[in-house]
Amino acid sequence: MTPNDSGSPVQQVRWLDKTAVVDVAGEIDLSTSTHFQHDLLKVLDKSPKRVVVNLSGVSYMDSSGVASLVKLLSRVRRGACSLRLFGLTDRVRGVFEITRLDTVFEIYATEQEALA
Amino acid sequence: MTPTASRPIRLSIYSMPSHLPVVRAAVEKACRQAGFDEEAAASVVLSVDEALTNIIRHAYKGADDQQIDVELELLGPRGCEGLLVRLRDYGDQVDPSQIKPRDLDDVRPGGLGVHIMKECMDTVRFTPAKGGGTLLTMIKRISVKQEAGK
């Protein structure tokens, strides 16, 4: 999968009761991170109890993509909401480890674990 | 013909975010030619991407019509000792002593690029370039651990 027609790596948002599962795909860098952040924050407009971000389709992410997720995390923490990530490839997980944000985010291997 | 392993690969791009994937692909290929494993290649690609992002954002303040020169050079007589990357911009010069990684305990968006470069590469050196702009030199060597794993 590649960025959608709007240029955003966010492919779709699935709602499971009050949980928003955000499916993301493609490469997240300087050229796509603005759309990525915009679409992530837009999910919060519908007041989810939990946001679960599916990164299994993301082949590349740089610090601008990580920054978008940090922004989402800070917004989530302000409300009665939680944020979980799952499906990180080794390459994407590496960025979280280098920046030591793997200890800040709740990261799960599969969607099933993230939704448990 | 003489061996050409040490001759650098040169690219000149505009400061357009859409050019970054092209440079990443070239860096990935150069890393493979140098003999880096997947993890090391990923760290070099990420470092170059972060450096270019910083140039576009800070040296050129988002302008997308400015020049960035990229040079990739395989190190060693057989081109298998590592990779040297030179990135030259022609934008606002910054005092190299002011380019520092930020405190990672401060969890906030942005400012991670220099940390990533310094964490991933063996050498990261910013120098004011003649005629304006900055030359960033980064070196990644094949690690002893990777050599032992072959």
Image (spheres, coloured by chain):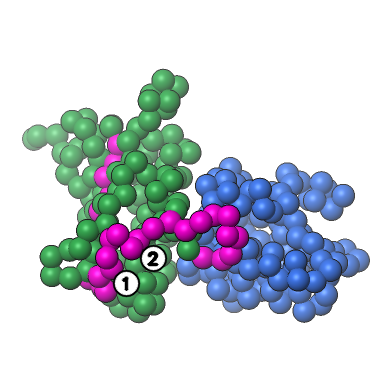
Read off the residue under disc 1. B59
Q: Amino acid at mark 2?
A: Asn
> What residue is drawn where x is 24% and y is 64%?
B134
B137 in relation to B59, above or below: above
Q: Quadrant of the N terminus of chain B?
A: top left
Q: Residue furthest right?
A: A17
Q: Which residue is mark 2?
A: B54
Magenta residues span B82-110
Q: Is residue B16 visible?
A: no
Give the x, y percent position of residue A93: 60, 47
Question: Left of B97 or right of it: where is B100?
Answer: right
* Up/down of A59 relative to B148, above or below: below
**Chain assigned green:** B
Dot 2 falls on a residue whose secondary structure is helix
Disc 1, disc 2: CB below 8 Å?
yes
In the rendered image, residue B16, in percent from the top left (x then y), is placed at: 37, 72
Quick one: which chain is blue? A
The one nearer the camera, B134 or A88, is B134
Tag 1: Cα neighbours inside 10 Å, few (<14), some, or many (≥20)? many
